[in-house]
């Protein structure tokens, strides 16, 4: 009954004219940026962060959330028609979706993607409503030691599970932590790493890092690409899937929803992991696995359901535990902290209209997305042909104006440009920026809880291993780290042994 009364409160918030407008704007923008190759939710949310500072916190979060899960819908359009995923989590959808388009079945592929996304989004939002309060109640037992261990686990997860080399990912986390402590020490009041610049006494702005790493760096990378792709937008016809398509897709949709809901609730695991896992599960369960990669409808339904379910349940660790699951969630967390709201288990008690208004808006937003995606699929298909060179000047202009308007500081614009160059260099070195932004967001909170725990224990680090919940988080962190490192160590040892054997 509590959930029903809370949802009634949430719908009362979400169904106001203002929040309905922001929800619609969010899902519309999300679909649009998901469709446009080279533009993603990270870029858009990073650019909109300065604007949300002047909005009501509930409205701004509803809009940003709509952009995030709306991009999961839109990303499937470019994946299917262009073989160029608008979102990273839609990359798996391109494997079979693009082949269906080549066979003249782009319409059914897009329809199944939209329907499975709607089903997954609705079910996973219900999961957030049912299990969010339970996790929040459990998290109220946390002290400073537990929060430190949980945040430490989230950072290690983000590095270990990130795409690319483990050492580079850990280096990105460390760089984020270093950037996060620039400014004034909260205990002593002394400046740290400000290099004598008064503009840095308050630290490096979150929007500076976010817009630089994701908007500016992404633009430079996309402008440098010259690949030509074949687009099948003219083949979007016979939109409704056949009964055979629906029969083949409903079980993969439910399995993808379950996997996505589970993975989305874990800190540091992206929707890409969920969609890939769902695809591999369907391929393993299929009677004829050879169909996959050649236009299997299950290969569209399962990953689309998984990435949309994960997009919704990402809000569980972000809002309830204060641990951003992905880089986009880190931007959400940054938007809340800019508004003076500290995410955590208390947010459901102190700001129930925020949490339940967001949950209710997800139900509304998913219904809006179904209406937007099916009738307007022809329009979205034509948008895939917009040249990127027409988009990036506007993006750059909004990035510069947004950063300047927040504090009326030219230094923020210069720092944003420098961060963009750094982001481009990191991309060339195959260093993913997501662990850096997570380290930047969690760094100050990690330090605060570390200091608080040590003060309460008179400087003894034993507090982190004598408290059961804290010890559990640390053991899980060590187990995952060893599981990722040991195979690499074993391979190097085998190579070294083979090399020694060859010289004898």
Image (cartoon, rainbow, N blue to C red):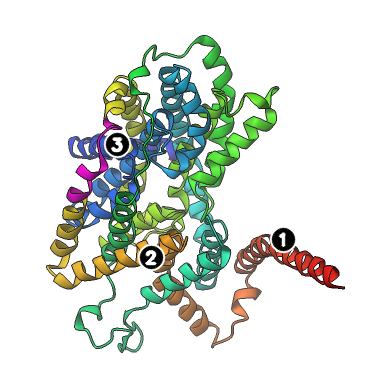
Which mark, residue 87?
Answer: none
Which mark, residue 487?
Answer: 1
User: Where does residue 149 sit, x and y in percent of width and height?
Assistant: 55, 69
Q: Which residue is mark 2?
A: 425
User: Where does residue 293 sit, x and y in percent of width and height?
Assistant: 58, 29
* Count of marks, rendered view: 3
| In this rendering, position of residue 401 left or right of residue 260 | left
Q: Nearer the viewer, mark 3 or mark 2?
A: 2
Q: Which residue is mark 3?
A: 27
Marks 3/2: CA–CA distance: 32 Å
Q: Nearer the viewer, mark 1 or mark 3?
A: 1
- Considering the numbered disc 3 on the image, is that residue within a helix, a strand or a loop? helix
Residue 437 visible in the shown view = yes
Residues at discs 3 and 2 in contact (Cβ within 8 Å):
no
Q: How many C-alpha atoms fall within 10 Å of the one at disc 2: few (<14), some, or many (≥20)? A: some
Q: Earlier in the sequence, mark 1 or mark 3?
A: 3
Q: Earlier in the sequence, mark 3 or mark 2?
A: 3
Residue 340 visible in the shown view = no
Q: Nearer the viewer, residue 58 or 247?
A: 247
Q: Nearer the viewer, residue 445 or 422?
A: 422
The magenta stretch spans residue 456: no
The answer to which quarter of the image holds residue 406 is bottom left
- Residue extending furthest toward the front: 503
| In this rendering, position of residue 170 left or right of residue 10 | right
| In this rendering, position of residue 209 left or right of residue 473 | left
Which span is picked out in magenta?
383-394
Marks 1/2: CA–CA distance: 29 Å
The answer to which quarter of the image holds residue 15 is top left
Q: Residue at x 63, y 30 (%)?
A: 282
Q: As displayed, is residue 306 above or below residue 112?
A: below
């Amino acid at each position: 009954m509590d959930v029903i009364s809370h949802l009634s409160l949430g719908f009362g918030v979400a169904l106001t004219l203002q929040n309905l407008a922001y929800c619609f704007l969010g899902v519309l923008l999300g679909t649009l940026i998901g469709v446009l190759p080279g533009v993603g939710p990270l870029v858009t949310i990073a650019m909109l962060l300065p604007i949300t500072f002047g909005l009501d916190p509930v409205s701004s979060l509803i809009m940003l959330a709509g952009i995030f899960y709306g991009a999961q819908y839109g990303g499937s359009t470019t994946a299917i028609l262009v073989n160029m995923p608008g979102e990273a989590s839609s990359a798996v959808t391109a494997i079979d979706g693009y082949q269906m388009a080549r066979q003249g079945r782009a319409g059914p592929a897009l329809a199944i993607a939209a329907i499975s996304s709607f089903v997954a989004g609705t079910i996973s939002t219900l999961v957030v409503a049912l299990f969010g309060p339970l996790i929040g109640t459990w998290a109220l037992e946390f002290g400073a030691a537990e929060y430190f261990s949980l945040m430490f686990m989230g950072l290690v997860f983000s590095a270990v599970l990130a795409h690319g080399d483990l050492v580079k990912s850990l280096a990105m986390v460390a760089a984020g932590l270093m950037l996060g402590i620039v400014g004034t020490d909260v205990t002593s009041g002394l400046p740290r790493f400000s290099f004598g610049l008064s503009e840095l006494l308050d630290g490096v702005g979150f929007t500076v890092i976010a817009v630089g790493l994701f908007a500016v760096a992404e633009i430079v990378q996309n402008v440098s690409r010259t690949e030509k792709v074949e687009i099948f937008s003219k083949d979007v016809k016979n939109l409704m899937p056949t009964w055979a398509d629906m029969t083949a897709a409903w079980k993969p949709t439910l399995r993808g929803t379950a996997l996505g809901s589970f993975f989305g609730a874990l800190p540091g695991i992206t929707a890409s992991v969920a969609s890939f896992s769902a695809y591999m599960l369907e391929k393993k369960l299929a009677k004829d696995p050879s169909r996959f990669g050649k236009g299997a409808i299950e290969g569209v339904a399962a990953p689309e359901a998984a990435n949309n379910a994960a997009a919704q349940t990402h809000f569980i660790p972000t809002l309830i535990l204060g641990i951003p699951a992905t880089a986009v969630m880190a931007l959400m967390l940054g938007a809340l902290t800019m508004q003076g709201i500290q995410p955590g288990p208390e947010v459901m008690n102190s700001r129930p209209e925020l949490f339940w208004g967001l949950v209710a808006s997800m139900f509304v937003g998913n219904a809006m997305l179904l209406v937007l995606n099916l009738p307007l699929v022809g329009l979205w298909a034509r948008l895939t042909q917009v040249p990127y060179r027409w988009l990036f000047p506007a993006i750059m202009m909004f990035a510069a104006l947004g950063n300047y308007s927040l504090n009326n500081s030219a230094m923020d614009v210069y720092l944003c440009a420098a961060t963009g160059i750094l982001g481009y260099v990191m991309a060339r070195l195959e260093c993913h920026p997501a662990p850096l932004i997570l380290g930047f967001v969690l760094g100050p909170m990690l330090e605060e809880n570390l200091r608080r725990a040590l003060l309460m224990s008179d400087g003894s680090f034993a507090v982190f291993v004598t408290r059961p919940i804290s010890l559990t988080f640390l053991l899980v962190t060590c187990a995952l780290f060893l599981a990722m490192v040991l195979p690499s160590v074993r391979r190097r040892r085998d190579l070294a042994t083979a090399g020694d054997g060859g010289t004898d």
